[in-house]
Image (cartoon, rainbow, N blue to C red):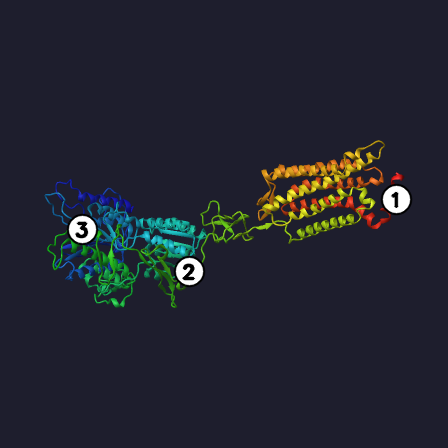
Amino acid sequence: MESLFTLLQVLMAIISFSGANETCSLQGEIEYPQLSKDGDIIVGGIFPFHNNWEITDLSYVAKPHPLKCRSLDFRAFQFSQSLIFATEEINNSSSLLPGVLLGYKIYDTCSSTGMAVRMAMALLNGNEKTVFDEHCTKPAEVQTIIGDTFSSPSVAIASSIGPFSIPLISHYATCSCLSNKRKYPSFLRTIPSDYYQSRALAEMVKHFGWTWVGTIRNDDDYGHSGMAAFTEAAEQLGICLEYSLTYFRTYSQEKVLRIIQQIKSSTSQVIVGFLTDLELQILLDVFFEHNITGYQWVGTEAWIFDPLLAALDKHNILQGAIGLAIPKTTVTGLEDFILDIHPLKSAGSVIFPKFWEALFQCKYTLQNDSENTTVCTGEEKLSEVENTFTDMSLMPIFSNVYKAVYAVAHTLHDLLGCTQTCPTKKQPDSFTFLEHLKRVSFKTKDGEEVYFDKNGDPPAKYDIINWQTDEEHQHKFVTVGLYDSSFPAHNRLAVNMASIVWAQNSNKVPVFVCSESCPPGTRKAVQKGKPICCFDCIPCAEGQISNMTDAIKCEQCYQDYWSNPRRDTCVKKEIEYLSYEETMGILLTVVSIIGTFMTITIAILFFRCKYTPIVKANNSELSFLLLFSLALCFLCSLTFIGQPSEWSCMLRHTAFGITFVLCISCVLGKTIVVLMAFRATLPGSNVMKWFGPPQQRLSVLAFTLIQILICVIWLTTSPPFPFKNFKRYKEKIILECHLGSAIGFWAVLGYIGLLALLCFVLAFLARKLPDKFNEAKFITFSMLIFCAVWITFIPAYITSPGKFTVAVEIFAILASSFGLLFCIFLPKCYTIVLKPEKNTKKQMMEKVKST
């Protein structure tokens, strides 16, 4: 309803400015100021002397009646006194505007946006009813307008008078929207923009560690603009809003109940209130009625420093509230002037009686129903009352009015060319005045610097205020920090945490989050359908870590590193290889040395008994060569133990391949000798001359050279090399020898297997020859063991993990070597050592005869 009424009044005001009329005349009713004083140049003022008005039924078929204002607001009188004080001080100054008298006209907006625009038009037009035979081209009645107190009326006024370049300087309108110079080119203010306040509030909330908050704002330009800036800053700082509600004092009960239900059903315990004191005064009773207590309130300068609101908060709804306020300031003589009500009496004969009656709670004229009302005598003393008018807590705002008037005076002083005196008293044109006003810079008598930035805003500085309760259960406002937007980002906010008392009288900073912080070793995972502040803590996967709280993702460890059990540090991976220090390595080394020692012992025994029949009958030369190769086989297993290196990788496989071929070649030679020897005993056979000692040596050499050739080709084309195996175990590094060429490795094994198979077949054919040559039986057993070991070796080698692969290979080497050693040489050693009587030529011949 008010918006329609406002539109109607604005249209009527615009019509009054129309240059299309043939004559210039005032349209509509004359509007008279509440307080005024004549002067050479007039400063306008627009303040809400009343809090509200009577709602009337608008039919829009007839001219609407003027608003009937109600509830006198003493704050507007304080603002007016500040304006009057500044003009009087300037008029009495010999250095600022000498000879020029400043006057003022101050109007009442009745807290209505429509009335605010109407009063602004009255200030521009004047109140003359005279009809001029000329177009309306005269200058505005006032040089500038101070006001309005609230943002929404200021937006409407700035939009209306902006095209005329009439400056509007507000002392209390903080909406960041008014910083837009394209929409509001003539608007300036002496109070910081809500853009800075919103960011300061967001930084303060983040400073306390709160990330889960609710908000409630005025349903007007002030609330919407301020909350939009807060929301943007909050998102940048990682703060989430569980809800964002709007409220205005004209809301229906149904809308208010929906607000209450939303707050009660939420989990956040912080409420950021972008409200005016009028809205919050109404909400206090509603909150108490619905038991909404114990919440941590965060407030703006619009209410955080309001003593009237504190007095009305009888149920401590706002206990522990913290917020921003305009820094305390001092204007010498202003407090005494405000409390001196004579200037109000002389400046406004109409409004003053109403002011007096409201101030002292009396009536000049008693009505029939006013029997209990005190009669005003006119001799009441201000020192005997205590109310909003006597409260000086809003001195920073009074100072803003004072600075606005002085900004006008300094601009006029420069434009009029004043030195010892001002050569002219003519009012400058509005455009020129506005441009100079934007660039004005001066210091007040108390040393405060005043200037406007490119958006018409002053620098943003705030005190951080905390609501506390004294011993008498009275609210007190304690300054616990400050915020200065001119400082670097990391130094703007300074808070004394120890001096803050939080909601419910807690001295410890409360924790208000949707989800508890994720510790190191975990990462945040946003819960589906909820803001980013609501998350689950997911442990990092293996090989990943997070070493900070609330990590968004886990970092992968480098290849040589692995995550510790807590997943908060990358530690060096355990390096695994078969070493001499571990139990398995020690056992295999001992077994290998024992095998070598046994082989050498047997060789010594055979050497000492080399002329005995049993040694001579079994080809002693090949036997010694076989023992030598077996010793090498035992020793080559040691090359598989220890950290792999380039040389050890090449040596272990080639030494193993060559020594085993040498060993099998000797066994094969002995088998062939057995067969040839049996053939030689047949009548007329001369086979032995074809496979005598030279041929035996040559065959062993030939078989071995073939293996050497295979190894040389392998080493020259793609040799084995040290290799870090990261795939077998995620948390370990397996140091092993990569085969290089798998074909080379299997060619070496295959050649050994081929010789072993041939030897086994020949030994099997010779197994039933006479006892004198029964070595073929033992060779058969040894080859059977050898083949069994290496056949089972292949699947075990492929499937064994890590160092066990090497252990399997060593075990195969040792097992096959012991098989050959025991099967071929142990029976002979038994005879030589324990049955020496059988190791004679006579015994050997008897055995031959018996066969």
Q: Amino acid at mark 3?
A: Phe
Q: Is residue 68 visible?
A: no
Q: Nearer the viewer, residue 166 or 812?
A: 812
Q: Amino acid at mark 2?
A: Ala
Residue 270: x and y, percent? 42, 55
Between the residue at mark 2 and the residue at mark 1, the CA separation in whole angstroms equals 117 Å
Q: Amino acid at mark 1?
A: Lys
Left or right placement of residue 500 versus residue 837 in this view? left
Which residue is under mark 1? 842
Q: Are marks 3 and 2 in contact (CB under 8 Å)?
A: no
Which residue is under mark 2? 503
Left or right placement of residue 753 versus residue 64 in this view? right
Residue at image location 66% in from the left, 51% down from the top: 585
Which residue is under mark 3? 433
Q: Earlier in the sequence, mark 2 or mark 1?
A: 2
**Quick check: 469 above or below 197?**
below
Q: Is residue 623 visible?
A: yes
Q: Are marks 2 and 1 in contact (CB under 8 Å)?
A: no
Q: Nearer the viewer, residue 350 or 609?
A: 609
Residue 626: x and y, percent? 74, 43
Discs 3/2, front: 3
Q: Assign a secondary structure to mark 3.
A: helix
Q: Nearer the viewer, residue 565 or 430?
A: 565
**Quick check: 774 above or below 434?**
above
Residue 574: x and y, percent? 58, 51
Q: Quadrant of residue 759?
A: top right
Q: Earlier in the sequence, mark 3 or mark 1?
A: 3
- Label 3: few (<14), some (14–19) or many (≥20) C-alpha neighbours in 10 Å: many
